[in-house]
Structures are given as structure tokens and as C-alpha cells.
């Protein structure tokens, strides 16, 4: 009598194979159906990494930009200070040059006065200098008188100065008393060897000066009236 022998392990293997195939097929079908979702997830993941990298780069750029702005501010401040210092030095240099020019002009003036003094004797007008001021028509004058004598006698008297020029085509003479800015200025003199007068004058509008006439009226009756004429252009310093 024959007996039917069933091998159980082959049946189990077949079932396992069938289940595995089903899982594989279902997974494949699910992956194919949901591929777009995986692509989206992957793209979001990659985009997130890229965004984070960009944020890091942006932060670095902002920090560098902040440092550059601070450095630029320091450089601008230093440049401003350098410009101010240069302008101040330039102004001081210009003032020194102007001062040297005026001192040189005065030195030449007094050298001329001293040279003239050696040739003169008694009371005389040794020099006249006119310096234009800032405002039109305003001038400062310097007048030098000398008294060369072997005695101890003092020169005493008063000064009279006229400015001859033209105004509106008409010749006109202005006395210095009428154009002095300091009306209280004393034009009398009393000295032994050397005397200097300084004062400011203002010429009328439209008046063009041509000549200066300086007269000395001495109280000494033995000294005649002394007069000296200067061309205006020759006195300008």
C-alpha cells in the first residue's frame, strides 16, 4: 500500500516567495505612483540645504559690509581731519607770507627813509606810504618826519596833507582832515629826531587819487614852510 507523503517545507517556501513577490510588486507600484512626491521631498531637502548655505553666505557678507562701513567711516574722518589740517596750515602759511610781504615792504620803506635822512638836514618829510584796506576807498597811510640837527633843538609844528584827484571828470582837492576816519587824530608834531604818523582815510565814491601834497608848518620862524609832493601810485605798498 502506497502512502502520500507531503513535504511541508516546500509549501512554506512557495508561500514566502509569493508574499515577497507581492510586496515587491506593490512597492514598485507605490513608488511609481508616488514618484513626484519623492522628487518634491528630495527637492525640498536640497533647497533647504541651499537656503541655509545662502543664509550663511549672507551673514558673512553683512558682517564684512559692516566692517567695511566702519573702516570707511574711519577713513572719511581721517581724510576730513587731514583736509582741515591742510587748510589750516595753508591759511597760516598765507598769513605768514602776507606778513613777510608787509614787513619787507616796510623795511624797504624805512631803508629809503634812512637813505634820505643822510642827505637831508633840518626838518623834512622823509616818506609816505599808502596801504589799501579791505573795503574799496579805504586806505591806511604812514608818514615819516625827520629832524636832523647837531643841536638839541626840538621840531614843533603841524602837518597839512592834501589829496589831489578827479571825481566825475572834475579835478578835486581833499584835505586829509575831511577824509580821516579818526576825526580826533592829532596832526601836530613835537619831536627831536624821528616821528611817524599813521591813520586811516576813506576816499569818496568815484574819486580817483593822483597826487599827495604834504606841508609842514613849523613854529620856528626861522624855518620856512616845508612841502613835498608824492605821486599816489608811488606810495602804494
Image: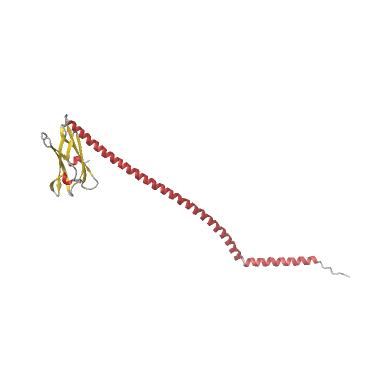
- Figure quadrant of residue 153: top left
Q: Quadrant of residue 105?
A: top left
Q: Which residue is nearer to you in this view: 21 or 76?
A: 76
Q: Is residue 21 visible?
A: yes
Looking at the image, residue 196 sits to the left or right of residue 77; the answer is: left
Nearer-the-camera pick, 26 or 69:
69
Q: Kindly identify the residue that appears in the image at 75 percent across and 67 percent down.
A: 15
Quadrant the N terminus occupies: bottom right
Above or below — where is 6 with respect to 107?
below
Horizontal and vertical percent for residue 48? Answer: 56, 60
Image x and y of residue 59, in percent: 51, 55
Q: Is residue 119 above or below residue 73?
A: above
Residue extending farthest bottom: 1
The image position of residue 37, as x and y in percent, is 60, 65
Residue 213 visible from this viewpoint: no
Residue found at the very far top of the displayed protein: 150
> Left or right: 45 with respect to 114?
right
Above or below for 133 versus 223: below
The image position of residue 104, as x and y in percent, is 26, 37
* Towards the viewer: 50 or 9: 50
Amino acid at each position: 500500500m502506497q502512502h502520500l507523503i507531503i513535504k511541508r517545507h516546500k509549501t512554506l517556501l512557495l508561500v514566502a516567495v509569493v508574499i515577497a513577490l507581492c510586496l515587491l510588486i506593490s512597492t514598485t507600484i507605490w513608488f511609481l505612483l508616488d514618484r513626484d512626491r519623492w522628487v518634491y521631498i528630495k527637492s525640498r531637502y536640497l533647497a533647504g540645504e541651499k537656503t541655509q548655505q545662502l543664509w550663511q553666505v549672507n551673514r558673512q557678507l553683512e558682517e564684512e559690509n559692516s566692517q567695511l562701513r566702519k573702516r570707511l567711516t574711519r577713513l572719511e574722518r581721517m581724510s576730513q581731519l587731514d583736509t582741515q589740517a591742510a587748510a589750516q596750515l595753508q591759511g597760516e602759511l598765507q598769513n605768514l607770507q602776507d606778513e613777510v610781504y608787509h614787513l619787507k615792504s616796510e623795511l624797504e620803506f624805512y631803508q629809503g627813509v634812512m637813505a634820505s635822512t643822510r642827505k637831508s638836514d633840518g626838518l623834512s618829510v622823509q616818506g609816505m606810504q599808502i596801504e589799501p584796506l579791505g573795503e574799496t576807498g579805504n586806505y591806511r597811510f604812514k608818514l615819516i618826519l625827520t629832524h636832523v640837527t647837531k643841536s638839541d633843538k626840538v621840531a614843533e609844528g603841524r602837518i597839512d596833507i592834501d589829496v589831489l584827484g578827479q571825481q566825475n571828470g572834475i579835478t578835486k582837492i581833499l584835505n586829509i582832515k575831511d577824509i580821516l576816519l579818526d576825526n580826533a587824530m592829532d596832526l601836530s608834531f613835537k619831536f627831536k629826531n624821528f616821528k611817524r604818523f599813521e591813520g586811516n582815510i576813506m576816499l569818496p565814491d568815484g574819486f580817483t587819487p593822483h597826487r599827495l601834497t604834504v606841508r609842514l608848518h613849523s613854529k620856528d620862524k626861522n624855518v620856512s614852510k616845508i612841502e613835498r609832493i608824492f605821486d599816489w601810485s608811488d606810495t602804494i605798498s
